Image: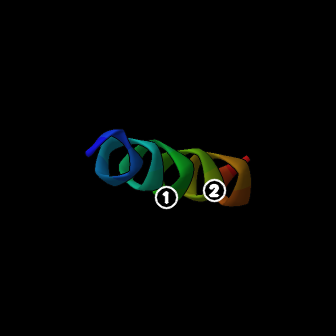
Amino acid sequence: MCLFIVDRVSWINQMEKNHV
């Protein structure tokens, strides 16, 4: 169940890194 949240966080983290 936590995997779903982790996937979401990972996706946001990647987007933020791409933005920088």
Name the quadrant containing residue 15. bottom right
Q: Nearer the viewer, residue 17 or 5?
A: 5
Q: Residues within 10 Å of mark 1 (few under 14, many from 20)?
A: few
Give the distance between the C-alpha atoms of the residues marked 2 and 1, in whole angstroms: 5 Å
8 or 17: which is nearer to us?
A: 8
Percent position of residue 4, x then y: 31, 53
**Extreme front residue here?**
1
Q: Which mark is residue 2?
A: none
Q: Amino acid at mark 2?
A: Gln
Q: Secondary structure at mark 1?
A: helix
Nearer to us in this view, 20 or 13: 13
Pointer 2 and pointer 1: residues touching (CB < 8 Å)? yes
User: How many residues crowd mark 2 within 10 Å: few (<14), some (14–19), many (20+)?
Assistant: few
Q: Residue at x 45, y 44 (%)?
A: 6
Which residue is denoted by mark 1 in the rendering? 11
- Residue 17 placed where, x, y %? 71, 49
- In the image, taking residue 8 as reference, residue 1 lies left or right, namely left
Mark 2 lies on residue: 14
